[in-house]
Amino acid sequence: MDKKRKQKILFLINTMGRAGAERCLINLLNSLDYDKCQVSFYAVIGMGELFGEVPAQVRILNEEPDPSSVFGRQGRRKLRKLMIKRLCSRHNWFRYGKGIVKALVFQLKAGRVDGKKLLWKFLADTAAAQEETYDLAIAYIQGAATWYLAERVRASKKAAFVHNDLTASGYDMEEEAVAYRKMDQIFCVSETVQRSLLEAIPDLKNRTEVFHNILDEEGIRQRSEERQGLSLRWKSGAEGIRLLTTGRLCRVKGYDLAIRAMALLCDRMENVRWYVLGEGEERGRLEKLIRSFGLEEKFILLGAVENPYPYFAECDLYVHTSRWEGYCTAISEAILLGKPVVATDCAANREQLRRNQWGLLAKMTPESIAERITVALEDADKAEDLAWKMRQGAERRAREKEKNLEKLYALAEEGWKREAE
């Protein structure tokens, strides 16, 4: 590699809202060696609170990043206005309407309509173009970022990260294959995600591998000590049990199962509370369900917070009730901070808890979730054992992190050599 020239790398993402993939991207950016690479960054929709956490060494290409939450009511209104504005400008509706209708028909047949997936390709096509050429460009998430990379970016090498089981998430895989076949490398965050992708698009096998999410372990531990979290919310002053879940308020995260499980737990134990960090489109429906069970003081939606880690540090048990996952960042963070975990038995959660050697899996029923929580809380020795295993595994995780980063540097170097020829 020419030492006088740094590798030129571009990272792309859909938005910079407080969500798992976005936090993992920040961790990755914080882990890069900026003596090796010159890094640029672009969000197809230039909104989200995490713009403020992008490292200073990274050049942000969005002209006026909007720090508004993409999950709150105000943020969703802004997104709707943006989409309507783009649809109505320059006859875009006539140009893209057929594709949007085609996507809608697919979703209706699948029995699940998701407005974002209807518009990802449209949003990518109507975002600002990038004129620069890069050694390596990386779409760090599926959706608009991947389409933008496939069709709007000039790069010698192109790579895409896949964070979800795309088939289970409702993507039209015949359509998505068009974008993924334009990638030189595809990184799946778990074996589960890789398996699902290859079942849908088998010819991607030779360019697909697993790249586990990078955690900023030292930073997470430090931030977990910054201030109090749940102790500020414990109004009664009495000791009790604190359950924690984090994630966007949406159907896939299974909060309806969690609320019903909490109703069962309250019949078994007196002083227990379940806290949720996150925001999303399901808040109104979930609040109504909470009221229907009389759990207003027991199941508490705290909204999104800038620093979630003190809440992890102060909880007794982390619970994740998702219907499906790619590879859950929050589970990894909870385990890193020595917290026992109960998670629903979807393929990715099963893989993740097996890899980290401890955790309890529950069936996707309120009864099973409540029963597994009860078992986990009664086994304090398991929590101590977990903390010990996490300390012992630090060296292994550091080696894996460096190995994964070297994959990116090697791709960028290949791109540089291809451009130089």
Image: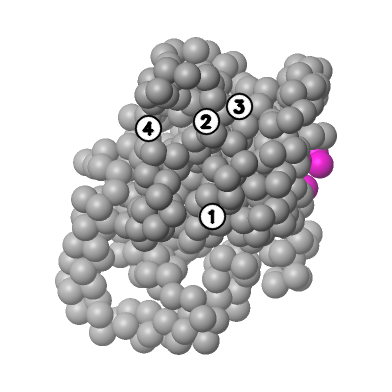
Of marks 1 and 4, the one in the foreground = 1
Residue underneath mark 4:
305
- In the image, what residue occupies the spot 21% across and 69% down? 84
Spot occupied by residue 16 in the image (x, y as percentages of width and height): 38, 43
- SS for callout 1: helix
Of marks 1 and 2, the one in the foreground = 2
Labels 2 and 3: the sequence-earlier one: 2
Residue underneath mark 3:
316
Residue underneath mark 1:
260
- SS for callout 3: loop
Of marks 4 and 3, the one in the foreground = 3
Which residues are drawn in magenta?
351-355
Labels 2 and 4: the sequence-earlier one: 2
Labels 1 and 4: the sequence-earlier one: 1
Q: Amino acid at mark 1?
A: Arg
3D distance between C-alphas at marks 2 and 3: 13 Å
Label 1 neighbour load within 10 Å: few <14, some 14-19, many 20+: some
